[in-house]
Every structure is written in structure tokens, then in C-alpha cells.
Image (cartoon, grey):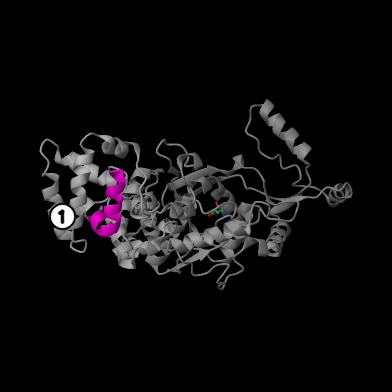
Amino acid sequence: MSEVRVRIAPSPSGNLHVGTARTALFNYLFAKKAGGKFVLRVEDTDLERSNEAYIKNIFDSLKAMGLNWDEGPDIGGPFGPYTQSEKFETYKKYAQKLIDEGYAYECYCTQEELEEEKQTAINEKKAYIYSGKCRELTESQKTKYKREGRKPVIRFKMPSKIMKFKDLIKGELEFNTALMGDFVIMKSNGTPTYNFAVVIDDMQMQMSHIIRGEDHISNTPKQIAIYEALGAKIPEFAHVGMILAPDRTKLSKRHGATAVSDFIEQGYLPEAFVNFVALLGWTPSDGVEIKSLEEIIKDFSIEAISPSNSIFEFDKLNWMNGQYIRSLPNEELTKRALKYIEKYDLTEYTKEKIEEIIAAVKEPITVLSEITDAVEYFFGEDVECNVEALDILNASEAKTILSKALNLANQFDYNNHEQIIEKLGEFRKSFEGIKPKTVMWTLRSALTGRLKGADLSSIISILGKEKVLHRIKKALGE
Ligand code: GLU
């Protein structure tokens, strides 16, 4: 069997979208599983919509996900260039070849003429197909049009037939190409259309399989017809279902983040994100969903990709990210959390203590950005109280509890977590007529300004004597 060569071919008209990221991942997995090559190609023929910042975002996001390519614009390879805007001459050459061999022709129709054709189709309640009226233009007609200043497009002569192909995911597919009409392959400004450039590139880059979103199924017969006209080997096709939002509509910005970089910025771990995205359409053979990229490669097969759409469950992503966060060693988690806590004066604590803080707050965290708020009360001398904490501190029993807590704070051995747990245990039960829960809430409110947070004994041990005493005194109004 010839070598497996697959590609991801993003158009840099936006940041890397999760849909493209999933297509990239499936291609990457397929290549790695088969010991083949994963190629990155930039489809920037639409020069107005493409920009450098998007290209950088796409490259960075793919790298962050660990989807390193074997050939691409930045690293080259045997079939470059890997950027379409560097290949305009090549597309021109192949378009001319198709004209010379009778598979394509120049079309001089103006926008107005095409509009008229469309209007007639609408009036007759028919689907619009280009009439093909420029198919048989004579040289003198062409010269006349040129003199009028008309610039031609090049159209491909779409054969009329029933075209069948076997999609590796969708199964047997059938199209009546007579309904497609002669489509444009080169625009009048000399740039290729997507359907043409993609075939030339996939042919030149010797792609064995085209794995992409099902929104491209309707393009496939056009592409196959071009391969046939060029006498080129037709790759295998595999079209993956779409990714829908939980409300079953197309995933879009109104549902939340859609760019990979936004997810990473919010604090989804790239490895958790990759794991989650793999499950958008692919099912592991053993039913175990949490898997590293290496494990996914081992288990991956195209047959295990569902032909249906998948739902992007934000709740599941959050759950999964939380699992990954909690499984990271504290040192590593702290490293990754640093950018979310750098607004605080980190010199207040040693490196070890910062790790203790992160470990103390990590339990309920689903995305790293939540860490900013979760660690807030560890920093600075004073704390700001939220409404619930203020209510607790204003209650009648607060003074009694806090006065005694001041004593307790002098008895803690701050380097001995066990001792703190023990002392707190005694303290909470030491008030007649006051519930242990109220005792703890009061102390917690004084120390953190809120009712929820890390384990209180850890907080005390990390804050240390000075801060603990200061905050209790402050709550007592001293
Ligand atoms: N540039 C196209 C896209 O981003 C590539 C489609 C394909 O894989 O053929 O949708």
C-alpha cells in the first residue's frame, strides 16, 4: 500500500476554529496510526480575507494541541510551496492545460448577464445552473469581448453523469453532476477558486486520503471530476459530521468560545481539550474516554468515527478539564496557573507556599482562569468581605467566636498542619449554644471574606500567624 499522506488545509480568515481543530486532529491521528505524513497547507487564495495574525494563531494553536506537522509552510517539504498564494502560476498552468485539452473554457459573461440567467431560473422555479453559453465561443467572439474590456473567468466543463464514490465515513454516495453546471475554476483576477486549487494541491502533494467536514461533501463531485480530467489518482474521501452546540444549532460565538486559542486562554489544558475534541465523533474501542494523545493514536480508526453530527457539550469539557487539572502534579499545575495569578504580589510567599495555595484551591476548579478568584484571599493584608460573610460577621455571636479565635491563633503551630486540624476540631465544638458550623463560618469569613473556599486548616497554615491575627483583629474591629 502506498504511504498515507493527509493534510489539514485551513483558510486563514479567522483564528483556528474547533471544527478545523477536530479535522486536524483526525487527520493527525490517522497519519500517526498508519505511520504516514501529516501535512499543513495554508489556503489563502482569498487574499483579502487572509492575514498573518490568523496564520500565526492557526500554527500556534495546532502546536499547542501537539499536532505537529511533517511538512508545511514553515518547515517545507518535498511538495512545497505549502501556501496557496505562492502557487498562482501553477494553478494558471493547470487551468490552461484543462483548456487546451477541452476540459475547461473561458467565460466572458458579465455579472449582469449571469444575474439575468439566475432571474430566469427563479421565474421558472428551477434551480440555477450556468447555461454554458460560453462553452463554444469562437476566437472572433472572444476577441470582441476582450476589446470590450471583459476579463474572462475559466469554467470547468462539468460532465453530466451519476457520480458515485465511497466515503470512508458516510458510505456510498451518489450525485447527479448535471445539476451542478460548469463551475468557475479561475476568477477573472487570475486567482483560483477553492475547488480547483484544492485538487491541484492534493494531487501535487500526493494526498492519499482527504478527511474533512461534511460541509465539503457537495464539493467532492466537482473535485473528482477535475481529478478525472487531469488523469490524476483520486484520493479516498472521509467526511466527518458537523459539530453542533447543545441547542443543536451550528456551534458559533454566541454559544461561547469557538477558537482553540480562546479555550486555552480561558484555562482549558491543551491535553484535555485534545482529548475532548477527539470524542466529537470518535468513540474509543474500550469505552474509556480519558486518554492521552498517544493512547488515542493507538486506539484510533476511521471506522470508529460516527457519520452523525456531534454535540459540543461544554459541561463535559469542563468536567474533563477538571479531571486533567486535578491529575497534574502540583508543581506543574502551579507553573500553568502562574499567568492567572500574576496580578497578585507573589513575593508574599515562597515558591513552595504558592504551590500549597494552588493545591488548596484546585478541587472545584474547572478552568485555570477560575484560579484568579479562588486564590484572592491569600494575598494582601486585608480581605474584602462578600455579603454572606458580612452577615455572618455582623451576627450577635461573632464577637464571642472571634475573641476566642484570637487566642486560638496564638496557639497554632503554623508549620504543623495536623496540629491545626486538631485545634480547629476542638475549637468548633467549644461554644455552648453556637453551632459548630456557625463557628467555622465566622472564622472563615474573618480570614477569607467569603463562606466558600479551600479547607480552613490549609488556609490558616498558609496564611501564617501574622495574617491570621491581623484579619481576626480587623474583623473584631480592633
Ligand atoms: N480551506 C478549506 C477549509 O478550510 C479546506 C477544505 C478541505 O479540506 O478540502 O474549509
Residue 282 lies in the magenta stretch: no
Q: Is residue 476 above or below residue 268?
A: above
Main secondary structure along the magenta-highlighted residues: helix
Q: Which of the pair 442/106 is nearer the observer?
A: 442
Q: Give the residue at x 58% y 44%.
A: 177
Give the residue drawn at x 49%, y 44%. Answer: 174
Q: Give the percent coordinates (x, y) of residue 353.
A: 30, 63
Label 1: which residue? 421
The image shows residue 368 at horizontal and vertical percentages of 38, 54
The image quadrant of residue 56 is bottom right
Q: Is residue 280 left or right of residue 221?
A: left
* Residue 344, position as x, y percentages in the image: 42, 57
Can residue 54 be seen at all in this image of the molecule? yes
In which quadrant will I find the N terminus?
bottom left
Is 239 or 419 nearer to us in this picture?
419
Frontmost residue, 455 versus 404: 404
Q: What is the total number of numbered labels drawn onto the structure image?
A: 1
Query: In front here: 456 or 253?
Result: 456
Horizontal and vertical percent for residue 439?
Answer: 18, 42
Q: Is residue 391 above or below residue 54?
A: above
Q: Is 273 positioned to the left or the right of 260 in the image?
A: left
Image-quadrant location for residue 205: bottom right
The amino acid type found where label 1 is placed reads Ile
Residue occupying image coordinates x 23% and y 51%: 456
Element under label 1?
Answer: helix
Give the residues drawn in magenta, as a range.
458-478
Q: Quadrant of residue 43?
A: bottom right
